[in-house]
């Protein structure tokens, strides 16, 4: 082996993309647990970090557009330039992951890291703010929408995934029913359905593996979904795959949904400035905040998610 190493000393080190397929086979065989992912308010995903002085049209525009500088590394999947191929691969991988089989009475523990709009103005190098929370899996408040709380319970989301059909159009409809969007967003019906699919990806935990696979296939069939054709570094310094809804070329920000490059489990979301711009009020005057291309203007990363048996318990 020493002699062989000497003979191959000048050989280049294989890149991550070449190693991922084999690594994934090992991970799939060895995995015994499920990813720990949960929720962020989906309206933040669909409309940006809202300020009452900014119009809805501006908020929607902030979510998409532009390109991020490449890092010279390709993500997992058969074709990193194709969102369809990548998401089909994601469906195949997550379908092999174990079902967490949640029980009524359990709680979801969530540890997040957040960075917010404007934080860079005061502290450009500030680390994301870490927080913890516990959400009842079968929360009575979130079991229906009649009491004014429109966030679905984690049980409703798990059951939604478990009951999804194979038809992508029907999946889009069911997601849109779970996450209805107001009529004043400026989005088309198809765009609203795309955001509903992404809201389900963002908020669903625990995850039914077969259902999540179907959700990924629905995203793969969605012409409004794009993928950054290289790995991106998330705000915690980890390599991720970034998919995003493409709503046009006029936007100044892009909302990215980040996936683990090996397991395709959901890691979180971030908004990235795709060019230099200044925020303005509805009357065109400056809001006193500007951003540079590539700046992360918002993030919520899922550091840890886990089912626990009682409120306040940690995994």
Image (tube, rainbow, N blue to C red):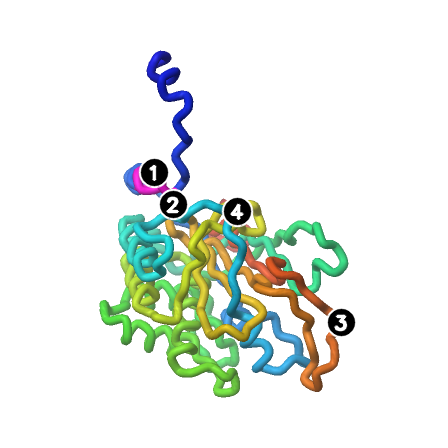
Q: Quadrant of the N terminus?
A: top left
Q: Secondary structure at mark 3?
A: strand
Marks 4/3 in contact by CB < 8 Å: the verdict is: no
Q: Could you say which is closer to the camera, residue 237 or residue 252?
A: 252
Nearest the eye: 189 or 295:
295
Q: Mark 3 or mark 2, which is nearer to you?
A: 3
Residue 47 is a magenta residue? no
Question: Gap in Å between the C-alphas at discs 1 and 4?
Answer: 30 Å
Q: Which residue is mark 3?
A: 288
Can you say whether 143 is above or below 94 in the image? below
Residue span colored magenta: 17-24
Question: How much space separates mark 4 and mark 3, taking CA atoms?
Answer: 41 Å
Which residue is labeled 4 in the image?
Answer: 314
Q: Is residue 154 visible?
A: yes
The answer to which of marks 2 and 1 sits earlier in the sequence is 1
Residue 219: quarter of image: bottom left
> What residue is at 55 percent from the left and 73 percent from the top?
251
Pointer 2: what residue?
A: 262
Residue 290: x and y in percent read: 70, 67
Asked whether 147 or 44 is in front, the reply is: 44
**Which of the marked residues, 4 or 3, is nearer the chain's N terminus?**
3
Residue corresponding to mark 1: 23
Image spot of residue 121 (x, y percent): 74, 60
Q: Element at badge 4?
A: loop
> Image height check: is 15 above or below 80?
above
Q: Residues within 10 Å of mark 2 (few under 14, many from 20)?
A: many
Q: Earlier in the sequence, mark 4 or mark 2?
A: 2
Residue appearing at x 27%, y 58% in the figure = 210
**Which of the two marks, 4 or 2, is nearer to us in this view?**
2
């Amino acid at each position: 082996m020493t002699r062989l190493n000497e003979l191959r000393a000048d050989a280049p080190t294989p890149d991550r993309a070449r190693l991922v397929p084999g690594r994934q086979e090992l991970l799939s065989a060895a995995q015994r647990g499920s990813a720990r992912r949960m929720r962020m308010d989906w309206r933040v995903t669909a409309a940006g970090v809202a300020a009452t002085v900014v119009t809805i049209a501006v908020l929607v525009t902030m979510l998409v557009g532009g390109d991020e500088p490449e890092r010279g590394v390709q993500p997992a999947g058969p074709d990193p330039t194709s969102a369809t191929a990548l998401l089909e691969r994601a469906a195949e991988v997550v379908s092999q992951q174990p079902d967490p089989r949640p029980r009524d009475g359990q709680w979801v523990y969530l540890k997040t890291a957040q960075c917010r709009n404007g934080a860079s103005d005061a502290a450009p190098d500030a680390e994301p703010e870490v927080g913890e929370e516990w959400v009842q899996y079968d929360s009575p408040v979130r079991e229906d929408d009649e009491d004014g709380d429109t966030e679905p319970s984690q049980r409703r989301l798990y059951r939604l995934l478990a009951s999804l059909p194979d038809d992508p159009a029907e999946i889009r409809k069911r997601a849109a029913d779970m996450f209805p969007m107001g009529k004043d967003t400026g989005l088309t019906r198809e765009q609203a359905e795309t955001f509903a699919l992404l809201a389900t990806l963002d908020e669903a935990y625990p995850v039914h593996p077969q259902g999540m696979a179907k959700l990924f296939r629905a995203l793969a069939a969605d012409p409004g979904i794009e993928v950054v054709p290289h790995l991106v570094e998330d705000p915690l310094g980890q390599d991720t795959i970034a998919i995003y809804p493409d709503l046009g070329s006029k936007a100044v920000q892009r909302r990215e949904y980040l996936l683990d490059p090996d397991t395709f489990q959901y890691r979180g979301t971030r908004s990235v400035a795709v060019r230099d711009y200044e925020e303005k009020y509805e009357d065109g005057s400056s809001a006193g905040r500007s951003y540079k291309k590539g700046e992360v203007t918002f993030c919520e990363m899922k550091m840890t998610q886990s089912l626990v048996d009682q409120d306040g318990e940690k995994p």
